[in-house]
Amino acid sequence: MSFLKCGVCTEDYSNVITNRHPKNLTCGHSICKACSSKLVSNFKILCPFCRKTTELRENENLQTNFALLEAISLFNDINESVTEPRSSGAPPNCEEHTYNLAEFVCISPNCSSRSKLMCRTCEEFGVHAGHRKGLLQVEAKKVRQNLLERQRKLQVNKKQVDDKIQALEKAALKKNDELYKEKYDEITRHYDRIRSSVAEREKTSKEVLKKSVLTSEEDNRMGQISNHVIRHLLEKKCEEVEQLVGMTDFELYRVKDKVDWNDESFSFSDVKEKPPMELKTLHVKLPEFRFEDSS
């Protein structure tokens, strides 16, 4: 509640803190004791609200506003506060003097203040002192009327643009159908040739791949056959040696001259050690295609 605050420093009045006690001026306005001490000059206080003078005698103090102190006590006894909803059209509280409503706007062209909203205290003592003011509702109405006029002009311009767009679209639909079809078919034939060439080269690349795989598989198969033949010969030689080892001394000595101690009918170098080819190592050269930017 604004009447429970000092209109100068905007601090709450207090019935406990002495410097926050409300003091009466002769004009009827109240300010806190701390502010009254700051405003006194030559035993006079100039009311910051109505500019009337309150004269003080030497060693005389301002009267305390006991009615306001009682109201503060009653207010402090209330545990529940009720907030009244404010209509959307009601002015907000002043940023500088929150106990007042900012029901005016500064319309001085040279005003450098960030906020153009102002209350009566701003008009008298704040940053807008001496500035021209207008009622917030009236000035907002002017702005709204300007916006509505601006909206009307924009809608007219938009309709003109829409009309031009429709005219251009209709003109585009009336273009030469035969020329359009001719160009369309030309593009189709061009890309058909590209697709045909790509398909042919794709077929060739796949045939090269298939031939390479078949050749590799045949090489692997023949190598395996050769290895099996060598293995069979080795097994046969092993059996012959095993038979010789199992002979009696007499028989072994009798046939020793018939044993071919230098048999080189085969060697380990004849064994195909090449592992089967892995497809990931197979390289097929692919043709490159270069497309020029037609833009």
Image: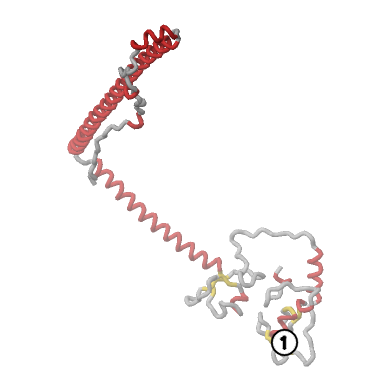
Query: Residue type at mark 1?
Result: Thr
Q: Residue at x 75, y 80 (%)?
A: 33
Residue 203 in the image: x percent, y percent? 25, 27
Q: Quadrant of the N terminus?
A: bottom right
Q: Where 196 falls versus 129 (above or below)?
A: above
Q: Secondary structure at mark 1?
A: strand
* Mark 1, residue position: 54
Q: Nearer the viewer, residue 5 or 49?
A: 5
Residue 2 in the image: x percent, y percent? 70, 70
Residue 53 in the image: x percent, y percent? 69, 87
Q: Nearer the viewer, residue 272 or 282?
A: 272
Q: Residue at x 78, y 70 (%)?
A: 72
Residue 214 in the image: x percent, y percent? 29, 22
Q: Nearer the viewer, residue 170 or 221?
A: 221
| Rendered image quadrant of residue 50 | bottom right
Q: Nearer the viewer, residue 99 or 232?
A: 232
Instruction: Mark yes or no: residue 204 visible.
Output: yes
Total number of numbered discs in the rendering: 1
| Rendered image quadrant of residue 88 | bottom right
Alpha-carbon neighbours of circle 1 within 10 Å: few (<14), some, or many (≥20)? Answer: some
Q: Where 214 falls versus 166 (above or below)?
A: above
Q: Residue at x 75, y 60 (%)?
A: 81
Q: Residue at x 24, y 46 (%)?
A: 295
| Rendered image quadrant of residue 271 | top left
Q: Is residue 137 left or right of residue 13?
A: left
Q: Is residue 57 left or right of residue 151?
A: right
Q: Is residue 102 left or right of residue 34?
A: left
